[in-house]
């Protein structure tokens, strides 16, 4: 079942002549882990903003085409309405936390929805436990580390129990280890809670293995789309300026030099190691 | 960061910190009214002394003394102005009573500073925002307040980064006369303002994405509840007001200078 359907979307920011999104059509199935990648300024962030109606409601501008989330047209709904369905996590963790304690921040969305105190308490504790920051609940947001701040942001979106979580480069302010932990949390949500994940990310090395739907964008258009195993071995990907995982590159070289590896493209070092062991034991 | 350390809020717990901020505010207003009602020295000194136990229970003596020291200059100014005006008014004569009333004005000011600093030293911004929300003020107001407090440390850090960056490019902040020094800060202020505006855009976006404005009836995770200590404080406040009004109406308050002269007369 499709949760997001975008048809022939063209969007131009106000005061700009060139469209940021230029004829995009895509379908996201329920429970998928979608990875969107592409060079800076290719329209990834703009595309994310259309999923909960920030575009066109907050940004104005000119929009053509159709965006359906769970069968409903986004342009006809307010952003606060969409917030219950689609949770958005932004790049800079600092600028999406407003309250003076972690727990109050997680409750922010629920307070806006006018939820009862008991229900709110339950959901806040649930969300905090899910991302593993229950112990930090009484700290001030500026006292915790960047990785923990980003977890607070994820928890605050989770508390609203959306069907879809959209994360726009959530780890670009984090070190590699914190980034990996964030990806693990996101993967867990996708696997255990069945939440549809749309992740915008440059670091394919860390994320390609989680995805089952990869979208490569360039200049406002979708260039390649499909299973990451099929797409990352495509010659064009390297030319667009996408960071291909090292395991995939090594596999390609081995294959070119005639080493008898499994023809399936590996996405992480674990997969490649298994293939090499298999080839060597023959 | 040392310059900005004073701007950070800290979480401390004490019986005074845990009091309901609304009750504490009523208490501050009551002290304010009492101090305004008495022009004499004696009751103002009493008002000063009865507040001291709160300072010690809250364990904020150090910061409290610092805030009083900050007010010392203004207090001295008030004293001098009062003495001078009475001096010129009474054909260049100065009596004990005049000096005493000038001192009383100064003490009144110190009592006000004392109670306000006690309030702000023992009320976390978190609590204050909550008090705003739950006394039927528009939520936008409370939100603006807590968000401002939340971003003080962030902005302070940013200001420091910009200062370092501009210094690295050869900007000399501590050079020239006062006017020049003020002008030196322009290359720091402009990037700071620009980035604050950009930040506010991102904040607005994040707020929209978290259902800002979904309902008129917003709820709150925390509820302010009155405890035993709050009832004690409010009864003390009411008692203080009753005593004040009674004394004001029926008791003749002696001047300290009169007391002293009668004492010396008694001794001789």
Image (spheres, coloured by chain):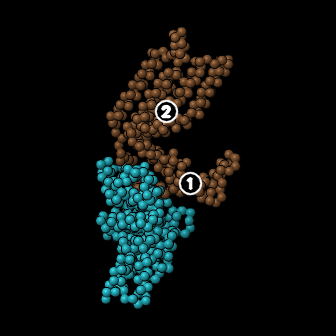
Chain colours: A cyan, B brown
Task: Name the residue at 33% across, 83% down.
Answer: A277
Q: Are marks 2 and 1 on the same chain?
A: yes
Up the image or down, A27 lies above or below B259; here it is: below
Helix, strand or loop at label 1? It is helix
Q: Is residue B18 something that shows in the picture?
A: yes
Percent across and percent down for residue B104 are 54, 24
Q: Callout 2: helix, strand or loop?
A: helix
Q: Residues within 10 Å of mark 1 (few under 14, many from 20)?
A: some
Chain under numbered label 1: B
The span from disc 2 to disc 1 (Cα, nearest Å) is 32 Å
Pick whichever, B172 or B201, lies toward us.
B172
Q: Are marks 2 and 1 in contact (CB under 8 Å)?
A: no
N-terminal-most mark, 2 or 1: 2
Residue designated by label 2: B114
Q: Residue furthest front?
A: B268
Disc 1 target residue: B160
The tally of labels here is 2
Above-or-below relation of A115 to A249: above
Residue found at the far bottom of this picture:
A258
Where is the C terminus of chain B found, in terms of image quarters? top right
Query: Dot 2, how many residues are within 10 Å of its Cα: few (below 14), some (14-19), or many (20+)?
Result: many
């Amino acid at each position: 079942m499709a949760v997001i359907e975008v048809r022939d979307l063209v969007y131009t920011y106000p005061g700009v002549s060139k469209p940021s999104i230029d004829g995009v059509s895509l379908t996201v199935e329920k429970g998928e882990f979608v990875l969107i990648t592409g060079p800076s300024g290719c329209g990834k962030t703009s595309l994310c903003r259309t999923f909960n109606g920030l575009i066109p409601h907050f940004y104005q501008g000119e929009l053509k085409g159709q965006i359906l989330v769970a069968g409903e047209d986004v342009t006809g709904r307010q952003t606060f309405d969409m917030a219950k369905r689609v949770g958005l996590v932004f790049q800079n963790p600092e600028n999406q936390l407003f309250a003076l304690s972690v727990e109050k921040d997680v409750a922010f969305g629920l307070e806006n929805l006018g939820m009862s105190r008991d229900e709110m308490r339950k959901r806040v504790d649930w969300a905090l436990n899910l991302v593993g920051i229950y112990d930090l609940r009484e700290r001030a947001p500026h006292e915790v580390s960047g990785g923990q701040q980003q977890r607070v942001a994820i928890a605050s979106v989770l508390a609203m129990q959306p069907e879809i979580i959209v994360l726009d480069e959530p780890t670009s302010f984090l070190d590699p280890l914190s980034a990996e932990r964030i990806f693990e949390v996101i993967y867990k949500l996708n696997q255990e809670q069945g939440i549809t994940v749309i992740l915008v990310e440059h670091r394919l090395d860390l994320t390609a293995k989680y995805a089952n739907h990869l979208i490569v964008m360039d200049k406002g258009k979708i260039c390649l789309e499909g299973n990451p195993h099929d797409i990352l071995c495509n010659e064009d990907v390297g030319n667009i300026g996408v960071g291909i995982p090292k395991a995939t590159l090594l596999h390609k070289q081995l294959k070119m030099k005639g080493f008898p590896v499994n023809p399936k493209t590996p996405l992480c070092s674990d997969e490649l190691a298994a293939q090499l062991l298999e080839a060597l034991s023959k | 960061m040392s310059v900005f350390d004073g701007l950070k809020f800290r979480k401390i717990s004490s019986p005074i910190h845990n009091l309901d901020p609304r009750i504490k505010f009523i208490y501050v207003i009551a002290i304010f009214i009492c101090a305004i009602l008495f022009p004499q020295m004696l009751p103002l000194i009493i008002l000063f002394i009865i507040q001291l136990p709160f300072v010690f229970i809250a364990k904020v003596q150090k910061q409290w003394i610092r805030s009083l020291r900050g007010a010392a200059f203004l207090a001295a100014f008030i004293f001098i102005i009062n003495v001078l005006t009475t001096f010129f008014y009474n054909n260049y004569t100065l009596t004990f009573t005049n000096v005493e009333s000038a001192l009383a004005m100064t003490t009144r000011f110190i009592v006000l500073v004392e109670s306000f600093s006690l309030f702000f030293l023992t009320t976390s911004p978190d609590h204050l925002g909550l008090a705003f929300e739950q006394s039927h003020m528009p939520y936008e107001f409370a939100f603006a307040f807590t968000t401002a407090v939340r971003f003080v440390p962030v902005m302070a850090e940013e200001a420091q980064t910009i200062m370092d960056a501009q210094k690295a490019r050869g900007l000399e902040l501590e050079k020239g006369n006062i006017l020049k020094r003020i002008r030196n800060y322009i290359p720091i202020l402009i990037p700071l303002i620009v980035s604050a505006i950009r930040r506010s855009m991102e904040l607005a976006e994040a707020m929209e994405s978290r259902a800002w404005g979904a309902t008129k009836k917003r709820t709150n995770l925390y509820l302010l509840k009155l405890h035993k200590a709050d009832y004690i404080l409010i009864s003390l406040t009411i008692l203080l007001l009753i005593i004040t009004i009674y004394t004001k109406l029926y008791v003749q308050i002696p001047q300290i200078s009169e007391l002293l002269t009668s004492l010396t007369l008694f001794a001789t």
